[in-house]
Image: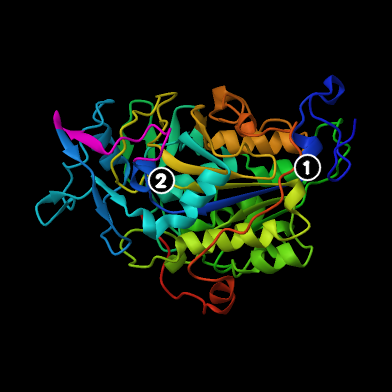
Amino acid sequence: MSRQSGGFMPADDASLGNPVGTYIKHVVVIIQENRSFENFFAGYPGADAPMFGYSNGKEIKLRPTTFDGQDLPHLWQSAMTDWDRGKMDGFAEDEGRAKDGWPYAYSYVKRAEIKPYWTMAREYVLADHMFPTEFGASFTGHLTLIAGTDNLTPTKAEVNFPDGLYDDCDSPQGTKTSTVNEQRKIGHYTGPFPCFDQFNTMAQLLDNPSSAASGRTSVSWKYYATKVLDAGIWEPYEAIKYVRYGPDWNTNIIAPQTRVLNDASDGALASVSWVTPSWPDSDHPGDASDTGPSWVASIVNAIGESPYWNSTAIVVVWDDWGGWYDNVAPPQLDFRGLGFRVPCLIISPYAKQGYVSHTQYEFGSILKFIEEAFDLPALGPTSAGYTDTRANSIEDSFDFIQSPRPFVPIPNPVGTEHFLKEPPSDQPVDTE
């Protein structure tokens, strides 16, 4: 029996095996900044997100806030304080966590300010157990979203951020990174220059598939950033020696990031895409800009209104918790983490409608799904620090038996034209 829309075969045909690659030909990973799950989705129906938390055993009601708020400490050290060995009650302890006498970390963003995200959650999938690979901040969060690891050895990983300008292969000579070991001790600026060849990334895997079943010579990919050179920690491939000094550098790193909007309509979308924002559109605390939800909605709308819709999966994820309260103690799978829960939206014509997934996901779950879609091997073994092998795929958030649902545009307060005309931001990207 064929589908009524697009001539697809039903996914319950046993001959299909894993159905992901039959229906998903494009995966787009949209990365936003510094929000815990509860900071955006406290009180969401069916999600594990109560409207209160705990600080040193005392219950604290979460208070509403806006994007016009302050940044919070969110390095490894702050994560250890917040986590408190799984008690999840240290979020008020760090200096800078109070505002007008209130433990500011115990806040959620008003729903009216993030309405596009709630609309996406109601129409598609909200995953309420997505955990970053590692405790800590944006530098390692972005690395692990392209590699599933940041291990330098099986017992030592990158942590926090480097000590120099740019944080990548173009950093000044002598720049050092910091490391964390299996005893969770920080080696401040004792690590290597931030131009890594100690671990594989998805670039190597997509460029050089080794699965005979796929019959591919390569899988196209693009990474959208504010600029190609010196884009900072939100463009992690500049810190990967294979990409920075290889042919991908001039073809696959795309700037400005708004080109994704035209690529969708112009038939130029790659098989796999990562999309990072400009500073004003990033959701980053302390910027006093509320355009992030509309930026994400504009990308979703551009793809949804293009011929790519029926074959695309979009994953929206935030790179770290940003110091905000969350009630769920992250499972500890190795010395790096998992880190604190972040929001995750899964959008596709095959995504379960209005579904809250409670499956334990991690950043490696996204990479595993990409591997399934394009019949790729794993990046490497769990014993070497790679997480895509151990992770649960996000596949269970899809229903491939259903016909692909027609796209309904996501209302966004700031229209797509705003982003297409938005001048390049001269503000530095996140430094923590």
Quarter of the image containing the N terminus? top right
Residue at the extreme left: 101
The quadrant where residue 216 appears: top right
Vertical position of residue 203 compared to residue 283: above or below: above
Q: Find the magenta span and give its range.
A: 43-58
Vertical position of residue 365 compared to residue 39: above or below: above
The stretch drawn in magenta includes residue 47: yes
Q: Residue at x 20, y 36 (%)?
A: 90
Q: Residues within 10 Å of mark 2 (few under 14, many from 20)?
A: many
Circle 1 sits on which residue? 208
Q: Name the residue type under label 2.
A: Asp
Q: Nearer the viewer, mark 1 or mark 2?
A: 2
Circle 2 sits on which residue? 320
Q: Position of residue 89 (x, y in %)?
A: 21, 33
Whether residue 163 is visible to the viewer of this picture, yes or no, is no
Image disc number at residue 140: none
Q: Name the residue nearer the viewer: 162 or 273.
A: 273
